[in-house]
Image (tube, grey):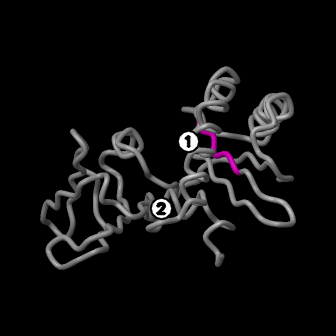
Amino acid sequence: MGLWPIFCFYELLMHGPPEGAADAVECGMLREQLIELLEPVVRHSGYALWELEYAGRRNGGLLRLYIDAPDGIDLEACERVSRAVSEVLDKTDPIPAEYTLEVSSPGLDRVLRTEAHFAQFIGERASVEVRLPVDGRRRFLGKILTVTAGELQLEVDGQMIRLAVEGIHKARLAPEL
């Protein structure tokens, strides 16, 4: 079976399902169900669900939520969301195996996955890797200029590069420290 089921949500998020992978489709469906279930809980607690990852393992999985707020995230926020999410997960039991729940901030080098993620950080630097080469390259480091209608525009080495958001393999903020 390989490593695919172990890191199914991370891999599905970053790479999409491999050809013919029934486990990947199931993982993707569970991920979407978890987002649908938990996003309102996180929002009701006063925060935004930035990202959700699940890594199922034979000896216990890991469900990781990244939450965000305009004023940032502290330990108290993580505890509050963890309690609220645990209560819902205990009632609905959507994950068929044992797992550990972690709640944290997305951090300075946060993952960027959606148009809204990119739009929130226009003017900031990002590291972007695309699935298929664009102008002979797959990796770009540049300033986010705009994101509209499924297209991300980056300024890379003084030139504007257009990338399809759906063609992005992975992306993160790349703050200059």
Residue drawn at x 70%, y 51% is 64
Nearer mark to the viewer, of 2 and 1: 2
User: Identity of the amino acid at label 1?
Assistant: Trp
Tell me the quarter of the image containing the N terminus: bottom right
Mark 1 secondary-structure assignment: strand
**What is the chief secondary structure element of the magenta stretch?**
strand
In space, the residues marked 2 and 1 are separated at their CA atoms by 21 Å
Quickly name the residue at label 2: 17
Give the x, y percent position of residue 32. Answer: 56, 40
Q: Quadrant of residue 70?
A: top right
* Nearer to us in this view, 41 or 72: 41
* Nearer to us in this view, 123 or 104: 104
Asked if the stretch drawn in magenta spans residue 67, the answer is yes
Residue 15, above or below 36: below
User: Identity of the amino acid at label 2?
Assistant: Pro
**Left or right of residue 145, residue 135 in this image:** left
Give the x, y percent position of residue 173. Answer: 44, 58
Mark 2 secondary-structure assignment: loop
Residue 126, above or below 63: below
Residue drawn at x 35%, y 59% is 125
Asked if the stretch drawn in magenta spans residue 106, the answer is no
**Left or right of residue 97, residue 163 in this image:** left
What stretch of residues is rendered in magenta?
64-68
Q: Earlier in the sequence, mark 2 or mark 1?
A: 2
Quickly name the residue at label 1: 50
Q: Are marks 2 and 1 in contact (CB under 8 Å)?
A: no
Residue 171, above or below 78: below
Residue 163, above or below 20: above
